[in-house]
Amino acid sequence: MNTRHKVYSMPFAKVYPLYVQKAERKGRTKAEVDQIIEWLTGYDRTGLQQQLDRQTDFESFFAQAPAMNPAAANIKGVVCGVRVEDIEDPLMQQIRWLDKLIDELAKGKAMEKILRQV
């Protein structure tokens, strides 16, 4: 049985606009979404744009991330009914970390709290 999730091969560029739309619907900005992605993955603006332009899939996007933020281990909570800290698959956990951070942004949390600086 293949336990590989479809999301792994999905282009990150397909989901990225949905992250931005979710944030903007709640009065947040694309720049804040980018800041979260850059904080989590270590991509800079240019690196992030290159990944989007290349239609890099989620698996490669996270595998090629310059430096996953060690503070990401502090991301806790529920996304899609699953506690992110209990996810055993490292790639799925990284994807859910990003989902959780975008959720927090859309819920109006302060950036310092989202980026685990408090």
Image (tube, rainbow, N blue to C red):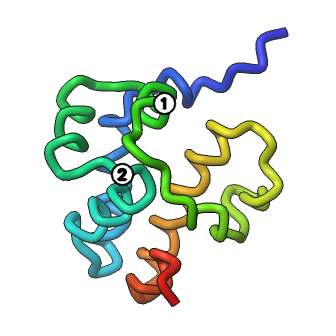
Which of the two residues, 25 or 102, is positioned nearer the viewer here?
102
Identify residue for label 1: 63
Q: Do callouts 2 and 1 mark residues in contact (Cβ within 8 Å)? A: no
Q: Secondary structure at mark 1?
A: helix
User: Residue type at mark 2?
Assistant: Gly
Which of the two residues, 4 or 114, is positioned nearer the viewer here?
114
Q: Secondary structure at mark 2?
A: loop
Q: Residue at x 24, y 35 (%)?
A: 52
Query: From what the image shows, is residue 46 above or below residue 40?
Result: above
The quarter of the picture where residue 14 lies is: top left
Looking at the image, which residue sits at the far left?
A: 46
Query: From what the image shows, is residue 108 above or below residue 32?
Result: below
Q: Residue at x 69, y 20 (%)?
A: 4
Query: From what the image shows, is residue 74 above or below residue 84?
Result: below
> Counting other residues with Cα less than 10 Å from the Cα at mark 2, is it few (<14), some (14-19), or many (20 or more)?
some
Q: Percent x, y for residue 76?
A: 70, 70
User: Residue type at mark 1?
Assistant: Ala
Q: Is residue 77 left or right of residue 57?
A: right
Identify residue for label 2: 42
Q: Is residue 7 left or right of residue 31?
A: right
Q: Earlier in the sequence, mark 2 or mark 1?
A: 2
Which of the two residues, 54 or 29, is positioned nearer the viewer here?
54
Q: Residue at x 48, y 30 (%)?
A: 63
Query: From what the image shows, is residue 25 above or below residue 30?
Result: below
Q: Percent x, y for residue 17?
A: 29, 49
